[in-house]
Image: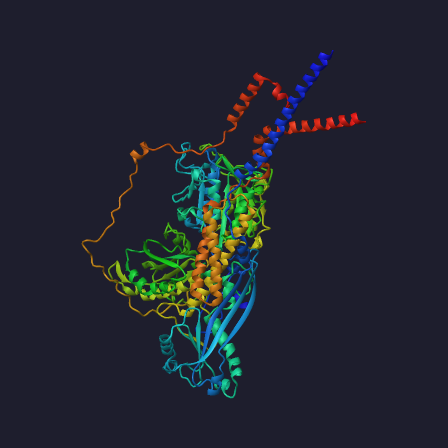
Amino acid sequence: AEWIHRFSLPTCPLLAVLHNENTNFIRIIVSIAGQFFSSGHTNNWAVLVCTSRFWFNYRHVANTLSVYRSVKRLGIPDSHIVLMLADDMACNHRNPKPATVFSHKNMELNVYGDDVEVDYRGYEVTVENFLRVLTGRLPPSTPRSKRLLSDDRSNILIYLTGHGGNGFLKFQDSEEISNVELADAFEQMWQKRRYNELLFIIDTCQGASMYERFYSPNIMALASSQVGEDSLSHQPDLAIGVHLMDRYTFYMLEFLEDIHPASKTNMNDLFKVCPKSQCVSTPGHRTDLFLRDPGSVLITDFFGSVRKVELTMDAINLTDPIKQMEENPVNGEEQKEVYSYADQLPVSEIIHQKPKQKDWHPPDGFILGLWTLILLVFFKTYGIKHLKHIF
Amino acid sequence: MQHDRHRCKCVTQSVVTSLDISRLAALSIAAVVIIVGVPLWWRTTETYRAWLPVSQIKDLAKLQLHLSADVEVVFARGTVTPEQQKKVPLTQTQDEEHAVDGDLLVQFIILRLQNMKPYRTATIMEEDALKKPTAAEADLSLHMLSESPCGSLVVYVIPESSSLLPEDVNVYIGQRRTALVRISAQMRVGKTLEQLLAQLEPRIKQVLQVMSFSHTDITVALSDRVRFRPGNKESIADSMRAFKSSPGYEITFSLLNPDPKSHQLHWDIEGAVQTYIQPLLTKLSPLANFSIDSQTLYYTMLGVTPRFDSSLEAYTLNADSLAHVINPVEARLGSNAASSNPVLNFLLYVPDIRHSPLYIHDHRKQEVPSNAFHSPRWGGIMVYNVNGFYGSETEFPVHVNINMAKVMGVFLAQLRLLLGVQSLSPPPGFLVAPCGSTGLADWELDRLMWSRSVENIATATTTITSLAQLLDQIGNIVINDNIAQQVSSAVTSLQLAMAELEVGNLGFALQYSKEAILASEKAFFDPSLLHLLYFPDDQKFAIYIPLFLPMCVPILLSMLKIVSEVRQRRREKQAKKE
């Protein structure tokens, strides 16, 4: 054990396995407080969702983009981030500074930089798509960038923001996801071992209600407000005309700006972000499902992507010369497939299209009411005595 | 007066009959609603659920794996006396039973590791082969004589007079499926056959630990399904390094040239892949499909500034900073958008002229001979220095032909580690032959196949059992016919795979386990199983009340009225009687 302390450097967040078959070399596993084995993850994923649309919900998009920016800065590549934005603020007609989304007033920081990769945009952000991404039940034609291809050694960060209530989160102003559905989705992820550890952050009104129903292991949850409280927005910008950020995410971002890929800050510091004096609402967190102690969980375990690295000590001695590839004799009559574009606007098909068969729906409330009225009138004219026997 | 009474009677009679008719109408409406309406509503709002073999799935949950391997022990001349030769027993089996705690779904995993050992003496041709000068040649000629099927082993016991093995080595493990064990004189002189066999037993067990499956291997293969026991840290590191079992893998070779103005790099990647990598992948084809592609990236820097070491007159990267190299580079590497298979990236980095030569140092500031490092479940990076190709007056850009043999040697070693070929340190007195030009010994392939089969079976079992539990819990999910069919075929394949493992047919077991896992994944991840039908009870009431209440209230009230009238009449009758 003393060897380990003597050889471990103070800022060494990785594992190096020294392995030499020829000498009687004992494997020395150098780590800091057993970091490799305690975190147990080899890759990081992030699912960042903004669920509200319309110009006055600018702050939700700015929230999500700021978290996206921090997560990318700390190392998670775009291929491991699923970004879902329900509306396009940067190219909105009401944006006085097009192609920008600001998170600080006086337009200090443009979080919509040059390399934003939005995977689900606009009306694609629905409860169904969100649950499909989490559980992996996507149709086979879905491209790789829209999938969450995590395995049992992935740490996933899930960030949701928008308008919410006691036990639900509103999507696109027309549907909602309940806390039970979310808990069931996480349980399905656990059953299929789609995550090693999960950090769930939600910045909505009454956000704590969304993590009340979780029951799968290895989930840590943070929310911006308790049940019965509202999450408030931070500051309006008079030039743009809307509130730019929510308070909780604003202070969380200030906290994250101090984190760099090699920092050692742990989760207990994240729990202290935005106390009631700054946030007006009381942020909450839930750690009872998490196996490790939050004090030993690094921020970069979820927000960054510190790779574990091992030095390659062996090499195989290859002595065969490279085979020369046989040149295929070029034939004059070589069959070449001719490709062409499909007809982009098949006018003749459109003109002669038959109207689509609509499914039959039972009559809705208006029709039922109308018929009730007609029946009442009938009874009125032809004799109320038939009704008397009933009432 | 009589007329009035008569008329009264008629009037009351007609009143009574109209009351009767209305009562009859109300009763019949109620009867129709209850007898016809309620069952009709129930049937039309039922979800279609195809039949699933639930009892078979429950049986699978008690996972009992029996693994058996054939080990043949052959005594060469000089190891047993002729009298002992006649008494050599034919077979001996050895059972080991281990119970491993599963998690909640797959309760118990019982492993029975069985080794069937037929004993025999060597044939003339085998004796000739054992007389070759070196162990490697003996191995080759023994392999020419008979090829062992996959999963089985042959152990040749040679006398101490044999010159095949060097002095301090007692066991030689060949490239294929044979091992040579040397017994010393004191082990066999004056001992009975039983004693000799008893002494040989631990040696053979050690050989099996190296060349075939062992309890720890199988537990590691099941590592995500069993309770995390922080016992063996090395094996856990191994399980975290290798990719999980997947039907296919994508391998990408990338050449990173940050300084095209100075270096014009040329690498014969097609030829190198064909000569060095393809044989390994062909050998591994029963495990998974591999697809290879390659690319060259220009102006891609490492993202970490190396330090100049004046004592070596070179730039160094120490092991701490390696962790931050991968992320900036990964953004530039593409991947195949169409498939969701895991990707193994192998990068060859040629440092730019201002940071040449570049060496990787380990924690003790010593140079890493291969100048390469790898990241678990991601891939490997090798730094290739080309400063030897030019002096001070050369004209830039310098044309460089990369030595692919050296590069592919390193990549092949990394590929082996990432695919799960564990490099164990063998016990003392053992000599392990270096793996051949394919990069993989036959017994290493067998070990991989054992652990993959077990991993596939465990994963498929858990998937099926959790799917069955999920469908049971949530009554609203529609189970289509194709899902039921996938589940049934997965269950059948699992049963077949476990049967083949018990017998020892490793190839078939792996194939069935792959089919099982494909079918179970298809069933679990079918897009139609999305549960969006969560209705809390109060919402269900809110939907049905406006539809059914206006209809039910008149019926109920008329029923109540009838009941109260009947009761009143009965009371009147009773009052009349008294």
Q: Quadrant of the N terminus of chain A?
A: bottom right
Q: Is residue A226 above or below residue B79?
A: above
Residue B235, position as x, y percentages in the image: 50, 65
Q: Is residue B568 above or below residue B256?
A: above
Count up the numbered dots. 0
In the displayed orientation, state which residue is furthest to the top: B1
Expressed as whole percent of the image width and height from the top left, the position of residue A122 reads: 43, 38
- The quadrant of the picture occupied by the C terminus of chain A is top right
Report the residue that reaches farthest toward the right. Answer: B578
Relative to the observer, which residue lies in front, B337 or B158? B158
Tell me if I can see residue B151 in this picture.
Answer: yes
Give the residue displayed 32% in from the left and 66% down from the top.
B405
Tell me which colouring the rendered structure shows.
rainbow
- Say whether residue A197 is visible: no
Rendered location of residue B205, percent (x, y) = 50, 74
Task: Name which quarter of the figure residue A209 lies in.
Answer: top right
- The answer to whether B315 appears left or right of B100 in the picture is left
Q: Is B575 located above or below residue A380 in the figure?
A: below
Depth order, front residue of A113/B223: B223
Residue at 37% x, 53% y: name it: B333
Nearer to us in this view, B365 or A326: A326
Image vertical order of residue B342 relative to residue A368, above or below: below
Q: Residue furthest left?
A: A332
- Tell me the residue at 79%/27% (across/down): B577
Q: Farthest residue to the bottom: give it.
A: B190
The percent coordinates of residue B73 (x first, y second) are: 46, 77
